[in-house]
Structures are given as C-alpha cells and as structure tokens.
C-alpha cells in the first residue's frame, strides 16, 4: 500500500463521478413519494390505487438498490444474493397473509366470542 | 491489495484478492441484508396479519396517524440516502473532506428522521392514548416501527464511527482523541433526536420556542457543548490515514443505510399509506 | 498461477503499514489458557465447538435416559411431572441447539478452510465471537438447573415449555417463572451466534477458494455447509422476531400472543415453524455432506452423480422454506393451504431420494472397505431412509391427523435425527479424529460401539412406532397400566440403556485413543480431499503452499501427479516468501470480552423486572442498570475490536518445514 493513494491529491485516475445520476435519482424518488401521498386522497377505485402504490413503491425500491446501493455496477452475484433473501421473504409474507386470511383461520367476531364465553360458562 | 499498490489505481468494482472479485466485506454485508429481509418480512407479516384480521375493539389507524409528518420523514430519509450515496462517491474519488461533509449530512438527516419518530411515538401515547399494551395495533405498530428506528439509530452510530475514523492521524496513535470525538458526536446526535428535533416539530405545530428552550435547558446546553467540541475536533490538522483505499468500508455502511431506507419505503406504503385507501 | 496467488489474500503482500489503535498489546500466546480464549485459529475454534457440543450431547443423553426411566413402567414416580416437563424441554433444546448444531459448526470450522485451500476463514475474529456467543447462549439456557441446587437462585427451574415453546405456554399467566425468560433470551443469543458464523462461512466458501477450485469442484461437504449457512441466515430471523414478540409480551405488556387482548397464539406456531422446518434441514444437510465424503473414500470410487447431489442439496434447502405448515395440519388452516403444504412436503422427498440413490450408486461396483466410519455411514443410509419413509407418511394430511403428537412422531424424528444426523456425525468424528488429533482409534472398539449404538437405537425407537399408533401421546409424564403400552415402553427403555452404553463406549474409546492411540499418518484412510494432504494434526498455517486444484477429488489428483504438483508448490512457496511469507491473522481479546459483556447483559436483562438481591438485601430495584452495563461493555469491546484492525504476522518455513514467526514487520 503506497502512501500516495491515501491522500486527496493522489493519482489522477478516479472512478467517474456519479454525482448527477444520484441527484436525478433522488429527485425521482421524491416525486414518486409525493405522487403516492396524493394518490391515496384521490377519489379513484380502490384496486387501482392499491396496485399503483405497490408498483410505485417497488420502483422506488429498485432505484435505491440498483443505483444508490451500486448493484448496477457490481458483480451480478451481489444481486442474486440479495434477491434470494428478498424473494424468500416475499414468498413467506404472501403465504402467511393467505394462511391468516383463510376462512378457517379468521378470529371470532365480537358476537361469536361473547357467545363462546357464555357457552363455556 | 498489492495490485493497487503496484499500479496506483483502485478498482472499486473488482477485488483481485478474492475468488469472485467481490470484496469480502461487501459480500458479508449483502448476505446480512438478505438475512435482514427475512427479519423485516416476519415483522411486517405480523403487523399485516393483525391489520387484515383486526380483533374487536382495535385502534383505528387513520384516526391516529399524522400522514403529513410521516411523508416529511420519508422524504428526509430518502435524502439521507442521497447524501450517503454521495459520501461513497466522494471517497471513491479520494475526496476525504467532501466525504466527511456527506457523512455528517447523512447523520443529521438520520437524526431528523429519528426525532420525527420520537415526536410521533410521544404524540400517539400522550395525545391519542395508543400504547404498546392497550391494542394489538399498538403492539405491532410500535414494535415494527421501533425496530426500524433502532436500525436507523445503529446506522447513525456506525456512520459516526466512520466519520471519527477519517480523522485518525497517519502517524498513528490518537486513541483517546478518537474516543472523545465519538463521544461528542454520540451526545450531539442523541440530544438532536431525543429533544431538539421533537421540540422543533412542536414549534412548527405552534408551541412556544422559549418555553421549550427553558424546559429542556440542560440537554440543549449539553448538546451545544458537544457541537462546539465537534467543531474543535474537526479542525484540520496533520495528515490522516483515511483515504480512497477505505472506500469499501464507507460503501459497506452505505449498504446498511440504504437498506434501512428501502425498508422504510415498504413500511411507509404498507403500514401508513394503505390505511388511507 | 503464481502471479494470481501473490495477488490473493493468502499471502501477506502489501498489508497496510498503518498503525492500528491498540489499548493493550495483542495477545501472541500459543499455549495456555489465554491462547485458547484469544484464538482465531479455525481449528482451535472448531475443537472448542466440538468439545462443548459433546459435553452437551452427553447432558442431553442423560436427560433422555431419565425420561426413559420415568416411562419404564406405568404409574412411575421416578421424577415429578414438573421435572419431567423440564427434562423433555431441555432434552430437545439441548440436542438441537447445543449438540447437533454446534457439532456441525465444529466441522464447518475444522474443514471448510482446509477444503477450500485457505489459511483461515474470511473473518477470523468474528469466528471467535460466534463461538463465545454460542457459549453464552448455552449458559443462559441451562442456568435454570441451578435453582434445583441453590433454591435461593429463584429461576423456577429449567425451561419447561417444550422445545418449540408454543404460545400461550410462554404467556406470563402460565409460566411466570424466569426459566421461560432465560429460554427466550438463550435461543435469541444462539441465533445471533449462528447468523454471524454462517455469514462468515458463506464469505469463506465463496471468496477464499484456492486457485483452480471452481464451485463445481468443491467437496460435497463444503457445498452442504454453504447451503446450510444460507438456510441459517434466512431461517433464524423468523424465530428472532417471534422471540422478540414473546419477550415483549412477557416484559413490556404487548399482546402478540395474548388471546384475551386480541392476539393469536397460532402466529407463534407459524413464525416458529418458518424457522423450525428449515432448521430440520440445517441439522441434516451437513450430515449428508459427511456421508458424501466418507462413502466414496471407503468405496474407492468418486461420488456418483456429483452435480445431482449438489443440486439436490440446494433444492432441499430451497423447498425447505415452503413446507413449514406440515407441522400444523391439525390446527385447521383450510383445505387449500393444507393441500399445498402436503404437496410441497411430498415434493421435498424427491431430492432426498435422489441423494440416497446417488449414495447407493457410489457403493455400486466399488471396492468397499468396512472401517468404522463406513459402518456408521452405511447405518446412516438405512436408518435415515426409515425415518424418511415415516416422514412421507406424515406428509399425507389425513394420516397425519392420526399421528400428530403421538409417539409415532417421536419415532420418526429420532430416526432422522439419531439414525440420520447423529450416525453421520459419529461417522465424521471417527473419520476426521486421526486428522485433528494425530491418533488412530482402535478398529475393534469402534466397531463394538457401532453395533451397541445400532442395536440400542433400534430397540429404543422402533417400538415407538407401535406405541404411537396405539395412541400413546408424546410429552406424557406417565400412563396407566391398562393402556397396552407396558411392553413397548419397557423394551424401549432397555434399548435406551443399551444405546447409552454404546455412546459411552464410543466416547471412552476416543478419549483412550487420544491418550494412548497409535500415531496416524497424514492420510490414514487414503482420502480424496485436501485436508489429507497436510500433516496430522495440521499446522497452524494449514498449507505450506496454497494448493492449486486441478480436479474434483483434489488430493487423489495430487497423489497421481506428484511431479507436476511438487513443481507447482515450489513455485508457490517461492512467490509467497518473496512477498513476506505466510500471512496469518493476529489473536484478539475482544471477541471473548464482547461475548462476556453479552452474557452479563443478557443474564440481567432476562430478570429485568426483578429487584437485585445480594445476601438477603435488596441492592437495586430492577436489573436494568446491570443489563445496560453489560450491553455497554459489549459495545465498547466491539468498538475497540474495530479500531484494533485485523493485524497479522508472517510465518516463514525453514528447511525442515518448521515455522518461524515474524511479528510487527508489516502491520
């Protein structure tokens, strides 16, 4: 390790600056967030708002991981590694929500609960 | 590492000392983040399971949330991510000074976010009467967002350690100074997010500044002293050891910070916005 | 190639000259207590893991024998019902988290760096931290036993909630004792240890491979270690969250699992098994790896269908995340979910079966040598298949409704965990003992212990199939004499004693061999993988020259191309010594100190709301200050650890291959 690389005035060759890319991405992210907040108050059908929110959040998510977190410029294995966790987590969440959403799993309503309490005594 | 010494260049996207070309630390962090996905996956699942099948008498989120404040916090966290990315960009180009500025900015925005959360939690408990115990929504909400807040706080601490490390003298030594510097930083950050930022939010909502200043006089004074100490520690002195070769370390902490940001992107949508649809 | 080597991490070339922050001088002792507490050597860490794990394996075994003694005759009162609950809880928890998992971790530590041709793991100090954190978890789980000896330690005995701690058993209402809090924190700490260790192994296997060692040339054991590490980092977070939620319910008044306030106890079961089922593969995949190493060596053939075995292992790991609800068929999940999980469970039998056929294919036409490790490995195939068959029976949800919570299930999972995991581990211990201790185990005594264990095991657990189908529920303290379970239980208990004698013989022979055994050469079994190419026991730096891997069975290739390899090695040694010699990581106190801080913090945090009492006087109103002090000590240690830097020193080998250390020259 030569001392030359340790100070700011070291070799001329550097990573090209990504300053402008980052600023632009940040602007896009801010705009998307704004759109999301406005969207929930608009009188549009529910399914459209929900899917729009999911898609917009996913877009934000992807912008951050591929640009801010450098996945776009890194070895593809980093992407694979992270997506293993991401996909498994998504799949587990999906399964859990469905399991608890099934009719058989729903908790008792207040009335049914009272009835059960009385029946048990 | 010898290749860069031989040529004087650092390739930030290929590490010739490892089998895959990915630096060990970066690989470790990405694997950890994959693991953390499952961590938050389980937490968010818990929250949503109880939201989709609420028990009788649950709290009503839309009556409790303050969506303007949360949107602002989200924006702040996104911008802190930008500063973090710029810090990595700066150190990859060997610019230590700019790296320090960006790290400080990231920490500052992180503290604003945390301060917003402190205000939010206090408001929910004291004004809206939603506690950890009195509804299942309170249990899941506070645990989920509290865990995320803890992640942010750990991130601020890690960034602080990295910031302080940039002052390590090239000549060696300076352990005591390093310690005091980090201490001052930690105190300043803690005062900022526990007292200062929540107080400023209260001022925005109409509280009297003078009253809050006198109410929290002790912590504010301590925080001010810590800030002065920070300025004193930051005066440029002898040559430092930190440089472009440390880009990997800054990037690793950056990965963590951005991850906390993307988790918030999901929480903001799943926990807050979808309640309003 | 020499060029590539010099650029690699294995040599000390160009290590940074900058001084690191040091509070006190780094430890350099190579012998004595301090050398073991500060070690970063993967072989020593592996041996510590192994030693502690065998200790707990024996403790868990004694607990099992007490359980069987209680059940030997109907209406027995050998232990009280509460003690019985403690025994089965701690037997399960101990065997899974404190015996099989750390034994696997021991082999990961011992073998992975040798298999990939590295001098240590990627993060040596982190590795030491995993070990000591694991010890902390083990202490927290077992500390409750002390209250039986010292009644003033008011923990309410050992945990008694079953190894799965189903809500609402963990609710403050039903188990107000501290034992449950210790169980919650102990598991949490063990999870932390496993995640940290696994991250380290993932990076080591992926990034520290020797030149020429492509992923498809990795030994199958190392592949299985990689898959297992992924399972650990992805499965443990689910239980970490579940444990946090229980902890909050017990200590901070949340309602995650409190039915009276809108919680759903079933959520605990789901989160637990999201972790718990991958955990089953975490226990069994490394044993599949040992067997895949041992069978080819003693069949004198390469492993049959290597890519398929590797792929099946990865497939098992992946599908393993989609079958958790088959532990919950009787909870009423709805038909769609039940059918989906039943199908996935049947599907996971396919890659498992593929592996078994590949092992049989390896034996087919081989020149089979029945040494002791081979006996255990063959026993593994047979016994594991039997456990697998009853597993497929459980996959059929309607049939499972009959078997749920009966002794049939006990029989099933002991066939896969003893007949499977433990047989393979005993094979592995016997197989690698000569490598790491340099002594041979006498063949006769090894075979005797095998037959005792084999017969004892089958006598214990085969009758349980019938007991279960006859309706005997699991976790039952005692039973009436007219249930028709008398003969089966008597037989099983006698079998358990025989199994105990077998296990005792096995380890007694190992101790004898360690003290008096014949010296083993560097390659006593005529092995195929790289660890057999170096002396027994291996020197601290593992390899005098980093090997270049030319084939899947790297050491067999080296044995048949000696001239070529000798030339290559001379080149590597020359290149390395020109760049400062063999680079080794420095020892450190901080991993141990950080773990100590964690022990102090977690021990006090578990008792958070109780006053601190010393000699009958109340000293503090709560344990919070002590918990914070411990956590602070841990953070401080971690901070000093990060400032200390990896450090490092160089080893030069003289003409006889004796190492000479040079400290401080480069770091």
Image: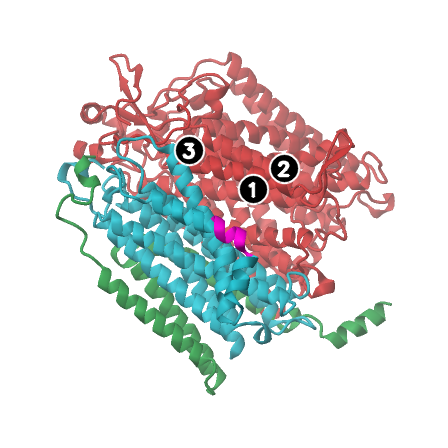
Chain colours: A green, B cyan, C red
Q: Residue at x 70, y 60 (%)?
A: C258
Label 1 SS: helix
Front-most of residues C165 and C302: C165
- The percent coordinates of residue C501 (x first, y second) are 66, 25
Q: Are marks 2 and 3 in contact (CB under 8 Å)?
A: no
Q: Earlier in the sequence, mark 2 or mark 1?
A: 2
Which chain is disc 1 placed on?
A: C
Question: Is A52 positioned to the left or the right of C217 in the image?
Answer: right
Q: What secondary structure do most residues of the magenta stretch adopt?
A: helix
- Whether C291 is among the magenta residues is no
Q: Which residues are magenta?
A: B216-222
Question: Is B5 positioned to the left or the right of C290 in the image?
Answer: left
Label 2 SS: helix
Which chain is disc 2 placed on?
A: C
Front-most of residues C147 and C565: C147
Q: Which residue is mark 1?
A: C189
Q: Which residue is mark 2?
A: C140
Q: With respect to residue B86, does C619 lie above or below?
A: above
- The percent coordinates of residue C143 (x first, y second) are 67, 34
Q: Label 1 to label 3, Cα distance in Å?
A: 18 Å
Q: Label 2 to label 3, Cα distance in Å?
A: 23 Å
Which disc number belongs to residue C523?
Answer: none
State whether discs 2 and 3 lie on one chain. yes
Which disc number belongs to residue C125?
Answer: 3
Q: In the picture, which quadrant includes the C terminus of chain C?
A: top left
Residue B188 appears anywhere in the view: yes
- Whether B219 is among the magenta residues is yes
Label 3 SS: helix
């Amino acid at each position: 390790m030569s001392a030359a690389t340790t100070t700011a005035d070291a070799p001329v060759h550097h990573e090209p600056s990504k300053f402008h890319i980052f600023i632009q991405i940040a602007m896009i992210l801010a705009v998307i967030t704004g759109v999301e907040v406005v969207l929930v108050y608009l009188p549009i059908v529910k399914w459209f708002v929900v899917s729009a929110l999911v898609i917009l959040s996913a877009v934000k998510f992807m912008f951050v991981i591929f640009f801010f977190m450098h996945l776009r410029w890194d070895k593809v294995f980093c992407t694979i590694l992270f997506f293993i966790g991401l996909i498994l987590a998504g799949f587990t969440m999906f399964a859990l929500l469905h399991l608890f959403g099934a009719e058989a799993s729903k908790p008792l309503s207040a009335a049914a609960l009272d009835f059960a309490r009385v029946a048990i005594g | 590492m010898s290749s860069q010494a031989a040529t004087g260049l650092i390739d930030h996207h290929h590490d010739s000392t490892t089998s895959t070309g990915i630096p060990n630390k970066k690989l470790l962090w990405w694997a950890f983040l994959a693991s953390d996905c499952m961590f938050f996956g389980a937490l968010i699942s818990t929250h949503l399971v109880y939201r989709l099948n609420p028990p009788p008498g649950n709290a009503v989120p839309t009556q409790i949330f303050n969506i303007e404040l949360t949107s602002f916090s989200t924006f702040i966290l996104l911008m802190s991510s930008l500063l973090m990315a710029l810090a990595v960009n700066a150190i990859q180009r060997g610019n230590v000074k700019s790296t320090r500025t960006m790290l400080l900015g990231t920490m500052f925005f992180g503290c604003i976010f945390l301060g917003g959360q402190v205000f939010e939690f206090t408001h929910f408990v004291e004004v809206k009467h939603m506690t950890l115990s009195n509804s299942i929504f309170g249990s899941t909400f506070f645990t989920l967002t509290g865990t995320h807040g803890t992640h942010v706080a750990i991130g601020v601490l890690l960034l602080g350690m990295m910031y302080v490390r940039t002052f390590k003298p090239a000549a060696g030594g300076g352990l005591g100074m390093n310690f005091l510097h980090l201490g001052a930083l930690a105190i300043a950050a803690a005062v900022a997010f526990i007292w200062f930022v929540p107080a400023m939010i209260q001022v925005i909502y109409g509280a009297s500044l003078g009253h809050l200043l006198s109410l929290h006089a002790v912590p504010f004074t301590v925080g001010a002293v810590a800030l002065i100490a920070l300025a004193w520690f930051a005066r440029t002195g002898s040559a430092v050891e930190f440089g472009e070769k440390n880009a990997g370390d800054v990037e690793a902490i950056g990965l963590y910070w951005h991850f906390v940001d993307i988790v918030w992107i999901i929480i903001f949508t799943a926990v807050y916005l979808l309640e309003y649809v | 190639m020499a060029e590539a080597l010099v650029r690699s991490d294995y040599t000390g070339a160009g290590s940074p000259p900058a001084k690191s922050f040091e509070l006190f001088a780094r430890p350099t002792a190579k012998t004595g207590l301090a050398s073991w507490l500060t070690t970063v050597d993967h072989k020593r860490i592996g041996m510590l893991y192994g030693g502690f794990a065998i200790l707990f394996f024996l403790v868990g075994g004694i607990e099992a024998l007490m359980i069987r003694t209680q059940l030997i005759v109907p209406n027995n009162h050998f232990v009280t019902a509460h003690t019985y609950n403690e025994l089965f809880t701690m037997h399960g928890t101990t065997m899974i988290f404190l015996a099989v998992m750390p034994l696997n971790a021991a082999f990961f530590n011992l073998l992975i760096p040798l298999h990939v041709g590295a001098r240590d793991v990627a993060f040596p100090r982190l590795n030491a931290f995993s070990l000591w954190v694991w010890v902390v978890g083990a202490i927290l789980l077992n500390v409750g036993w002390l209250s039986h000896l010292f009644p003033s330690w008011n923990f309410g005995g050992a945990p008694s909630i079953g190894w799965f701690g189903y809500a609402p058993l963990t609710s403050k209402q039903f188990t107000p004792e501290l034992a449950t809090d210790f169980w919650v924190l102990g598991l949490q700490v063990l999870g932390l240890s496993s995640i940290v260790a696994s991250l380290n192994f993932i990076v080591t296997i992926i990034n520290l491979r020797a030149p020429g060692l492509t992923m498809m040339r990795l030994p199958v054991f190392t592949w299985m270690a990689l898959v297992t590490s992924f399972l650990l980092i992805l499965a443990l977070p689910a239980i970490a969250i579940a444990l946090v939620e229980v902890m909050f319910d017990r200590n901070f008044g949340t309602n995650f699992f409190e039915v009276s306030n809108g919680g759903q106890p079933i959520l605990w079961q789901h989160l637990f098994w999201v972790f718990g089922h991958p955990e089953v593969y975490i226990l069994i995949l490394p044993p599949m790896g040992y067997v895949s190493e041992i069978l080819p060596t003693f069949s004198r053939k390469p492993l049959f269908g290597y890519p398929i075995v590797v792929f099946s292992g990865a497939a098992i790991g992946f599908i393993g995340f989609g079958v958790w609800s088959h532990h919950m068929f009787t909870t009423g999940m709805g038909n769609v979910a039940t059918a989906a999980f039943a199908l996935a469970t049947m599907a996971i039998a396919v890659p498992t079966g593929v592996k078994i056929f590949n092992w049989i294919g390896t034996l087919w036409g081989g020149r089979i040598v029945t040494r002791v490790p081979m006996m255990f490995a063959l026993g593994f195939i047979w016994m594991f298949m039997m456990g697998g068959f009853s597993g497929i029976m459980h996959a059929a949800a309607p049939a499972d409704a009959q078997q749920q919570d009966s002794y049939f299930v006990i029989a099933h999972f002991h066939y896969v965990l003893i007949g499977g995991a433990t047989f393979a581990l005993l094979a592995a211990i016997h197989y690698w003992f000569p490598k790491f201790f340099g002594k041979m185990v006498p063949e006769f005594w090894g075979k005797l212990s095998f037959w005792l264990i084999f017969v004892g095991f089958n006598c214990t657990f085969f009758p349980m199939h019938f007991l279960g189908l006859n309706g005997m529920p699991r976790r039952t303290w005692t039973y009436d004499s007219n249930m028709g379970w008398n003969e089966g239980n008597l037989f099983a208990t006698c079998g358990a004693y025989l199994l105990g004698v077998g296990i005792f013989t096995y380890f007694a022979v190992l101790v004898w061999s360690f003290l008096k055994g014949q010296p083993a050469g560097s390659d006593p079994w005529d092995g195929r993988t790289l660890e057999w190419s170096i002396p027994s026991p291996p020197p601290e730096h593992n390899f005098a020259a980093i090997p270049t891997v030319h084939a899947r069975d790297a050491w067999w290739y080296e044995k048949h191309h000696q001239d070529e390899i000798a030339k290559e090695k001379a080149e590597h040694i020359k290149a390395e010594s020109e760049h400062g010699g063999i680079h080794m990581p420095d020892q450190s106190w901080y991993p141990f100190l950080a773990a100590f801080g964690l022990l102090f913090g977690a021990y006090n945090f578990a008792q958070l709301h109780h006053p601190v009492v010393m000699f009958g006087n109340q000293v503090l109103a709560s344990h919070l200050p002590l918990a914070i002090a411990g956590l602070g000590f841990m953070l401080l240690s971690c901070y000093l650890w990060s400032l200390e830097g990896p450090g490092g020193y160089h080893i030069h080998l003289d003409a006889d291959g004796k190492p000479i250390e040079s400290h401080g020259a480069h770091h």
